[in-house]
Structure formats: C-alpha cells, structure tokens
Amino acid sequence: MENAFSDRINDVPKSFIREILKVTIDASIISFAGGLPNRKFFPVKALQKAAFDVFEEAGNEILQYSNSEGYLGLRQFISDRYRQRDGLDIPVEDILITTGSQQGLDLLGKTFLNEGDDLIIEEPGYLGAIQAFAMYRPRFHPVAVSEGGMDTSQLSQVLGERQPKLLYTVTNFQNPSGISYSDANRRAVADQIRGSSCLIIQDDPYGDLRFSGERKVSFKRIVPENTVLLGSFSKTVAPALRLGWMVAPPPIMDKLVIAKQAADLHSDYLAQRILHRYLCDNDIDAHIATIIAQYGKQKEAMISAIKDYFPAAVQFTNPEGGMFLWITLPEGMSSMTLFEAAIKKKVAFVPGTPFYVDRKDSNTLRLNFSCSDEPTIVEGIRRLGASIKELF
Ligand code: PMP
C-alpha cells in the first residue's frame, strides 16, 4: 500500500501531539499537553443568539455559496481592528478569510514553495507550521528563538548563505515557548529582511491574549512590503468556527485567492455570518479581558509552583500572554524519558522534540496553562517536579 501514496504524504509524520493526547484521555491524568483554549470561555449563549438572528433575518442567503475572499462585513471588522489596535491601515481588499490560520499556512506553502526551496523556521517552532510546510518539501533552516526573540546572528548567517522565500514567525507568546520578540529584536530582524525577496509570515493567534507588558510593533509597520499577517478567531472566540484570516499586498493576494479557490472555494459562509453577527452585537474586548484575567492567574500559579517544586537547575520562560510556557532541563536530560516517568505519576506534557525539524530527543518541554484551574496546576507541577528529581 505504501507505494500508492505520494512522497509528500509519506514524508510528513503524524502529529505527535495527537498521539500523545491519546495517552491523556485517562481522566485521572493532569494534562499540560493539550493546546486548547479553555472551553469555559466559549461564548455559547451569545453565539447561539447570533446564529438564531442571522437565520431569522437572512436564512436563504447565509446558506448559499459565497465569494472566495470572505464576507465583506467580517473583513471590514478585521480591518477596523488593525486600525484601532495597531494603527495599521489595512484595506479590506488585502484581507482573505481562511479556514483557521492553519489554512493560511497551507495556502502560503502552495503559493510560494517548490520542492527544495529554502524556508526559515523558528527553533523551537510551531508543530502545525512544520507539518503544513513539510507537505511542499522545502529545505528547513531553523533559527533559534529565546526570551526576547530571534537569534539575529543565526538569521544573518542563513540569509548570507541561502535565499529563503519565507521566514515563519510567531512573534507574540509563541507556540511552543511562550516567548515574544522585543521591539528592538523585531526591528533588527526587519533590517535584515528589508530589500530582500524573503517574506516574513507573522502568525499571531495569541497576540490579543496579553496579560502583562506592552503591545509590540507589528512587522507590517516596520517592513510592510515583506510581511504577510495571519490571524485567528480560535483563541478569542471559538476554534470550532474554523475562521482565521491573512493579510497580504495585492500581487500576493491574487495568487492566494487562486490557491484558496482550489482548496475549498471559500471558508464556511454560515460560520462567517454568525461570527460577524456575534462581533457586532457583543463587546469582544470585554470578552477577551475575561479570558486574559483567568489565563494570567493560571500562568502565575504555574510559575510559582515551578519555583516551589522544580530543581533550581531547570529553566523556564515567563510569558506575558498566550497559553504555553517552555521548560529547559539540564543539558543531556531527555524530556521523552521524563514523559514516561511523569505519566506514571499521572501528569502529562508535550516533550520538545516535535517542535524541532531535525531532533530525535531534546531536554525541553511545553506546558499548557490555559486549560487547568489553579489547584490542579499546583498539583500537576508538584508531580512533575517529583518526576524531574528522579532523573537527577
Ligand atoms: N498558528 C499557531 C502558532 C497556533 O498555535 C495555531 C493553533 N494551535 C494555529 C496557527 C492554528 O490555529 P487555527 O487554525 O485554529 O486558527
């Protein structure tokens, strides 16, 4: 049967996280492995009302095929929000509604990557981006990110040796590490990219989930002609809507729309209309404020439990937003071995390995703090601390 499949699909491994999540179905396990927003905050009643209202008012219209670019009202909402939040002037023509920001990654791969093309990815990097781009068989060039942003000397080395078409970044509260690029780091990255043919993809599903610190400058402001933005309603409203967007200048947008048409004609129009109605009738900022308040407390609980229960040699990031933080064990320790020990103590996390393009093992791991309440977080970190001590 193996021969029947394309090289493309044979080369891309199954999502490691999905495999791991199978182990954590056991309800007695405290799981920091998932990457889900907290379901407690889905605006169930308000979405139900929005759905009822649009069915009442425009039932025949909202069930019809629609245009590939997406519902104009929703694109206008996104454009207005960029103006209010970032002072960015983004015309609606530069906005394409996608089936989650995950589809944005696939469309970019389809539009830009030939086999063997060079692509820069963060290390560690978002697993879903590695998987989406791997379908187009590029040559990955990992560049390290840590607290403060991207390693600009590594970046300059890659740019000196290769001509990458794409540079993939998650500049705010990165998945998996929780780190954010400082303004100075963004400017340093932009300085290297400006004038080249490399496109920066700024994937930003977590940017609105900031619980401390200041909002940072967008690549769209400092290097606009080289920037494509990806956004998502998954973490602020609900992931099941599968609605996100991309922002790109006209020549790129023309090609993206072709890729979009070939992929699915358009994103779910019914979902777009319900979401738009929800956004018009409710205060999304008040809703986001509720989410952030809780995630912020959960993050604090995790950080203080880590300080209490982990050996001092273990390093951790302290994110200003988002849903994840990143642990670095002492050199030579294996997070896969730790995973096996931790499961026996009924606590789970994602080992760092799948977030690298070329490693079989690592001393790093990702912890999710959006889905567990504070007492559960403290207990889970206590168990994890005990598992780590066994490895010393
Ligand atoms: N980019 C990043 C960095 C993510 O963490 C995720 C979700 N885990 C996505 C994109 C995809 O999100 P969605 O397709 O739901 O918008």
Image (tube, rainbow, N blue to C red):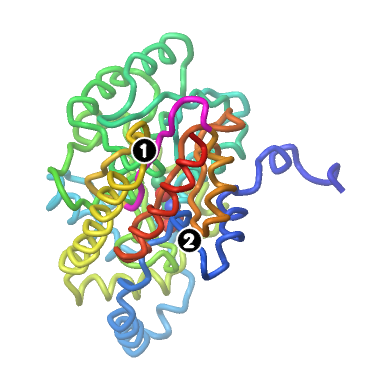
Residue 121 vs 254, above or below: the answer is: above
Q: Viewer-proximal residue, 76 or 239?
A: 239
* Residue 332 within the magenta-colored segment of the rendering: yes
Q: Quadrant of residue 166?
A: top left
Q: How far from the left and from the top, in percent, is residue 116?
A: 61, 24
Residue 274 vs 224, above or below: the answer is: below
Which numbered disc flags the more N-terminal residue, 2 or 1?
Answer: 2
| Mark 1 beta carbon near ligand 1 (under 8 Å) | no
Q: Is residue 94 left or right of residue 355?
A: left
Read off the residue under disc 2.
Answer: 266
- Please state the extent of the stretch shown in magenta in the rendering: 323-333
Residue at point 18%, 36% (across, down) = 217
Residue at point 12%, 45% (across, down) = 87
Judge the density around disc 2: few (<14), some (14-19), many (≥20) Cα neighbours within 10 Å: many
Residue type at mark 2: give it. Answer: His
Q: Nearer the viewer, mark 2 or mark 1?
A: 1
* Residue 322 within the magenta-colored segment of the rendering: no
Q: Quadrant of residue 307?
A: top left
Q: How far from the left and from the top, in percent, is residue 128?
A: 51, 46
| Mark 2 beta carbon near ligand 1 (under 8 Å) | no
Q: Quadrant of residue 251?
A: top left
Q: Which residue appears farthest toward the bottom when viewing the image?
A: 56
Read off the residue under disc 1.
Answer: 311
Q: Is residue 278 left or right of residue 386?
A: left
Q: How far from the left and from the top, in percent, is residue 330?
A: 43, 29
Residue at point 52%, 70% (across, down) = 27
